[in-house]
Amino acid sequence: MDDIEKKLVDYIEKNKNEYVAFLQKLIKIPSLTGEEKDVQVFIANELKTQGYSVEMFEPDVKELFDKYPQIAQIPSLWNPEYDMPLKTDDAFTYSQLMESKFDKNKTYKDRPNVIAKLQGTGGGKSLILNGHIDVVTIGDRAKWKHDPWGAEISDGKIYGRGATDMKGGVAAMIKAMETINKSGIKLRGDIMMQTVVNEEHAGNGALGCVAKGYTADAAIVTESSGSGSVVTESGGGVYWEIKLKGKETHAACRWQGKEQYGVSAIEKAPLIINKLLEMERSLNKNEPDISLCVGMIKGGTYSTSTALECTLNGVAYFSANLGTKAEGLVKVKNLLKECVKNIDDPWLKQNPPELLFQHYDDAYRLGDNGKEILSTLMGAGKDLLGKEITISKMGACDARSLGNEGGIPVIVYGPGNTKTAHSLDEYIEIDDYIKAIKVLAVTIYRWSK
């Protein structure tokens, strides 16, 4: 490390208590998906005081569907009835949303993205730092040992909803840049920080930034990879629902002589499930490229009646090996459609199951154009942590929008362990948080100096 990099590390060490306090402030401001405004105003004001040019804008839902018809999602809120409120047999449309009864999902009113720009002196490479600010529901408050909005510190950990997913990452990128600025370092490259809304079950916040034309030579999404790991590939996901029909009758009337009269929709569910699992096994012969989860099954009204209906709900998570961008989504949707169609059963052939999609994310993989930003971060990590940064994969995140639709080489690097995300007593380790700030600060400096 050169003298400037040592200066950055020393500054972080001297100010780590203040950096921890800043993350606590973020956690203490509830920002459930759909209720992000208060924390975004706080961040915007913070960045203005640090000398950034700051703007706030609400994603334009119509623009997203017009520009990205196979990718754009229905805006979601944390409340169960507004989380994934609509279903489609192919891809969602703006007209479908506008014709629905879900008025709360039709706009991003009072749900702004924050864009903070710091212009470089010229001649350096530009960089986007991106993080989502919405968090998932806390669930049953009584089951938390720590206040989900308390940001309590215990045994070197900060507890609270969003600590790992992903206010730790947002705080880390803000404090990494603050370290550079307050150390008197002028970067040649332009820096843009984006704190975006509605990553959970939509991704429209980051997609809205792409739609506005924001771009850079590279981007780092500070989602929780852990300070010792960098992510170069994120998987996709298709949330599905399958509806089965039956013929309802009293159990005593199920058979009329030798002919079956009553058909329970539930008894047909194993045929569907087995076909889905057969598809999963086939695709995973060499390596696990798809994870097929049947999460819920509902059907029937009474134990002595054949069920008129049965509904299966689940998700198919898939790797970039099955395709990135919209092409991967289309492939996985078609795989699911084939499973539902091609079942050798007379009843299902006469009464075809209905397959609907509730949500979908495209997969992303870093290309050759991302080698330089990857090597820059890995070099910084090795110098600071004394060991090689490992390369890993993760589930869907906002890297997909910046990389796939924005055409920007994107890596994912930020503090926190994803195993604690979305869980009771979510936490982030302070040591991991501080290490990530150091790695980010040196990476940004090396990239844009």
Image: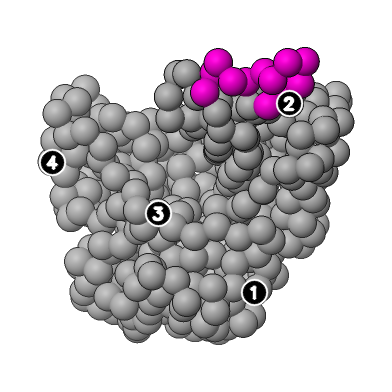
Q: Which residue is mark 2?
A: 271
- Sequence-wise first label, 4 or 1: 1
x, y (%) of residue 411?
Answer: 61, 53
Q: Amino acid at mark 1?
A: Tyr
x, y (%) of residue 139?
Answer: 26, 37
Q: Amino acid at mark 4?
A: Gly
Residue under the point 25% across and 56% down? 31
Count residues near mark 4 (Cα–Cα under 10 Å), then give few for <14, some for 14-19, many for 20+: some
Residue under the point 74% across and 44% down? 352
Q: Which residue is mark 4?
A: 150
Quarter of the image for residue 214 reads bottom right
x, y (%) of residue 311?
Answer: 55, 37
Query: Which quadrant holds the C terminus?
Result: bottom right
Quarter of the image for residue 205 reads bottom left
Q: Which residue is mark 3?
A: 83
Front label number (3 vs 4):
3
What span is colored magenta in the figure?
250-261
